Image: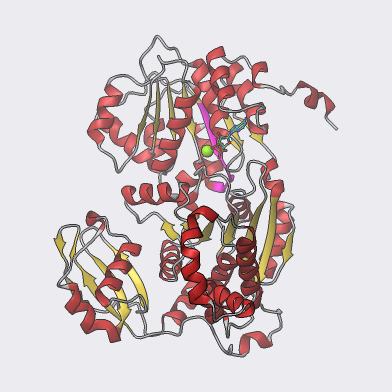
Amino acid sequence: MKHHQQQSRPEKFSQFLLKGELLKAISELGFEKPTPIQEKVIPHLLSSEQDLIASAQTGTGKTAAFGLPLLNLIDETDRGTQAIILCPTRELCIQIAGDLGKYSKYIPAIKIVAVYGGARIDVQMRALKKGAQIVIGTPGRTRDMLKRGKLRLDNVRRVVLDEADEMLSMGFKEDLEAILSQTQESRQTLLFSATMSRRVVALTDMYMNNPLEIAVARINLAAANVKHVFYLVQARDRYETVKRIADINPDIYGIVFCRTRKETQEVANRLMIDNYNADTLHGDLSQAQRDEVMDRFRRRQIQLLVATDVAARGLDVDDLTHVINYNLPDDDEIYIHRSGRTGRAGKKGISIAIAHSRETRKIRDIEQKAGISFSKELVPTGLDICQKRLFALINKIENIEVNEAQIGPFLPAIQEKLAWLDRDQLIKHFVSAEFNRYLSYYENAPDINLTGHPKDFKKGRRGTASRPSRGFKRFYVNLGFKHKINPAKLIGLVNECLRSNEAPIGHIEILKNFSFIEVDASFAAQLIEAGHKKKYAGVKVVIDPAADKPEHSKNPRKKKYKKKYSSRKKR
Ligand code: ADP
Ligand code: MG
């Protein structure tokens, strides 16, 4: 036991040699005790110029770990750029800039500028010109600024590479190298990464000098509040499983992790069609769309965010009730990373892995490597869901506050109208009014749990509640990102044209100026005719038949199934 280490740990931020202004600001933010990574990183940066490699998962407080010392060490009287922080996405840039802005609230002389793609470069150039001691950028835009001569790094003392593994996965290696080459050899380089892949190690070997390595326990304190559950189902029942998880947890607020952009879009589309508050976040979306989705998710207008690992990386959203692994990741660290998104801030969280039987090994693997344990649970059956929802409704009826004064005037008429129903019948009517939707959907819903017995794979499933494969027809619509259309809005438009939301909808592809949407072929004539009478955002709508996509067979499910195993996400 290393007791001496325990004793020397500062319990409070005030034990670090940080400026009073910084201490005041973070205390106002409610930071009481430093997190483990902060305990290790802050004193090092304040006292040493040695390079640093720190590995810690999302949510462990890395931003303040490097941000506070960085701010503390800035020479306020010098307006030149003294520190640069590189991170993979625009959202992270904005988040880090916001965090550092809050920490330095009482040191107004420190200017922080974020530069990232998808926003007006001239505005960012002007901000740089006014002087920015700390620049936070995505590698692409930062390099662009360097090329244009709008950013000078010759006086940069410290370079932070945040989420380094993700930057490498996203192909920023060359940009990073170009940026680093414009800084002085004597700079201090600080690398933060959730995982230490071979590529990260190679980068540190190339660009770092005798770095100090700091790792904090991979599962942070918060993650002790996470319960890990797995469900065993057939691959094709993954979607149905998500649906049931959402149905049995009406207040769910979570992220569904998928492997590929295509899969996120498909899962999100189906959830939206099935009337869930869901949307998707992946790299194919424009920046404006990503902002819009994140904003709605933060405000909880979206309950289920379907995302790829890259898109969700580093985003600081608290209070998630569930993390759903639509597929198990190949890497146990990624699983830990995903599940660490829930169970934060002292709250309990559940991480669910949807696995098929050949993946039980992967579950054991993750358990071993990550030192956690999963409990195998059963996907709720239709009956479970109906019971739970029913009792929630009954509870609500029991506990609802009755405002006598307001409803009083209406009561005589209502009494009269319902006089023919006795108490029993009345209860049945109220419950059915609220509840028939679930009852009919789950009426013949099968148990989709796998026992793990081989016969489960051969036998077809009876009474399936999932949608049969359909004859889709692909349509061109003259609305794209440019017109602020998104899948939900496009589906809405189709429903408006058809005056119904019954039409089965397949793949949706949204491009800049136009989109493609698959709709059940039997609705084609009606859709085209009604479409041409519509206007959307001031534009006269055109919906036309489009050529079928060659890769897309008549039986999409079969194709998808195959694809899932052949297309590993490129990392
Ligand atoms: P990471 O970069 O490791 O993913 P962040 O720096 O985004 O983590 O921090 C995650 C959350 O924890 C943020 O909301 C941040 O404000 C909060 N936080 C960081 N340090 C502390 C602390 N010492 N006490 C309380 N909250 C903290
Ligand atoms: Mg971070």
Q: 498 or 363: which is nearer to us?
A: 498
Q: To which quarter of the image does residue 27 belong?
A: top right
**Which residue is the extreme one toward the top?**
77
> Does the image show residue 218?
no
Q: Which residues are magenta?
A: 189-198
Q: Is residue 302 left or right of residue 60?
A: left
524 relative to 146, above or below: below
Q: Residue at x 26, y 55 (%)?
A: 484
Image quarter hosting the N terminus: top right
- Whether 194 is among the magenta residues is yes
Q: Position of residue 9 (x, y in %)?
A: 74, 24
Total number of numbered discs in the rendering: 0
Q: 553 or 215: which is nearer to us?
A: 553
- Whether 57 is among the magenta residues is no
Q: Residue at x 27, y 22 (%)?
A: 129
279 relative to 130, above or below: below
Q: Position of residue 11 (x, y in %)?
A: 72, 23
Q: Position of residue 473 (x, y in %)?
A: 29, 81
Q: Is residue 201 left or right of residue 150?
A: right
Q: Is residue 328 left or right of residue 545?
A: right
Q: 165 or 15: which is nearer to us?
A: 15
**Which residue is the extreme one toward the right?**
1
Coloration of the structure image: secondary structure
> Does the image show residue 454?
yes
Q: Residue at x 31, y 67 (%)?
A: 492
Q: 569 or 287: which is nearer to us?
A: 287
Q: Position of residue 186 (x, y in %)?
A: 48, 20
